């Protein structure tokens, strides 16, 4: 399908908006990575708010792009965009789309890394709380007859 100059411009503008958001998200995830490694909960919370704003902006641009695709008779989503760009000669749109796809892969990888750091920090915090509450080992234990004893009361090591 051949797009008119106006349609190409509109698609290019929408993909550019998504790309701008993805580039902002790259920076945000790097800041989050450093905040998680330094265990700075206030900074992590502030970054979480930033991420939410950028995600909403990206979702809005994506919805607009998908609406344009549907209005052109093309299926919404990545597959529809790929099919449209492969069928035409919209080189600017194709270049922007390709860059967006590359950044999306990097974002996914960085998000997985940050999620791993977060999970590890949560595990360390839980272990510290268990230690402070006098719970040793797993909270899920078994009695002498093999019965499951969940949430055994611990012995507090500190009093407030």
Image (cartoon, rainbow, N blue to C red):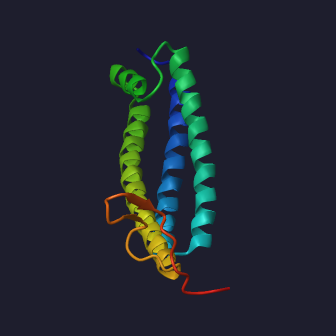
Q: Is residue 6 visible?
A: no
Q: Residue furthest front?
A: 145
List x then y, in percent, for residue 99. Answer: 39, 44
List x then y, in percent, for residue 17. Answer: 56, 41
**Left/right of residue 109 with respect to residue 41 in the rendered view:** left
List x then y, in percent, for residue 126. Answer: 48, 70
List x then y, in percent, for residue 77. Answer: 45, 27
Placement of the N terminus among the 4 image quadrants: top left
In the rendered image, the vertical position of residue 67 relative to residue 92, given as above or below: above
In the rendered image, the vertical position of residue 75 relative to residue 30, given as above or below: above
Residue depicted at x 38% and y 55%: 112
Residue depicted at x 53% and y 26%: 66
Work out whether residue 43 or residue 105 is closer to the camera in this orientation and state it. 43
**Left/right of residue 102 with respect to residue 26 in the rendered view:** left
**Left/right of residue 132 with respect to residue 147 in the rendered view:** right
Placement of the C terminus among the 4 image quadrants: bottom right
Work out whether residue 7 or residue 40 is closer to the camera in this orientation and state it. 40
Q: Is residue 63 visible?
A: yes
In the rendered image, the vertical position of residue 32 relative to residue 79, given as above or below: below
The image quarter in which residue 123 lies: bottom left
Q: How many marks?
A: 0
């Amino acid at each position: 399908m051949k797009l008119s100059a106006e349609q190409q411009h509109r698609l290019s503008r929408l993909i550019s908006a998504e790309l701008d958001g993805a580039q902002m998200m790259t920076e945000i995830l790097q800041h989050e990575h450093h905040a998680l490694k330094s265990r700075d909960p206030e900074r992590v919370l502030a970054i979480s708010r930033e991420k939410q704003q950028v995600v909403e902006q990206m979702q809005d641009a994506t919805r607009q792009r998908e609406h344009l695709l549907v209005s052109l008779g093309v299926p919404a989503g990545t597959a529809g965009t790929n099919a449209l760009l492969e069928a035409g000669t919209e080189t600017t749109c194709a270049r922007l789309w390709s860059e967006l796809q590359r950044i999306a892969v990097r974002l996914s990888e960085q998000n997985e890394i940050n999620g791993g750091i977060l999970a590890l920090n949560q595990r360390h915090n839980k272990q510290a709380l268990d230690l402070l509450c006098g719970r040793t080992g797993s909270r899920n234990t078994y009695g002498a007859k093999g019965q499951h004893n969940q949430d055994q009361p611990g012995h507090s090591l500190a009093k407030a």
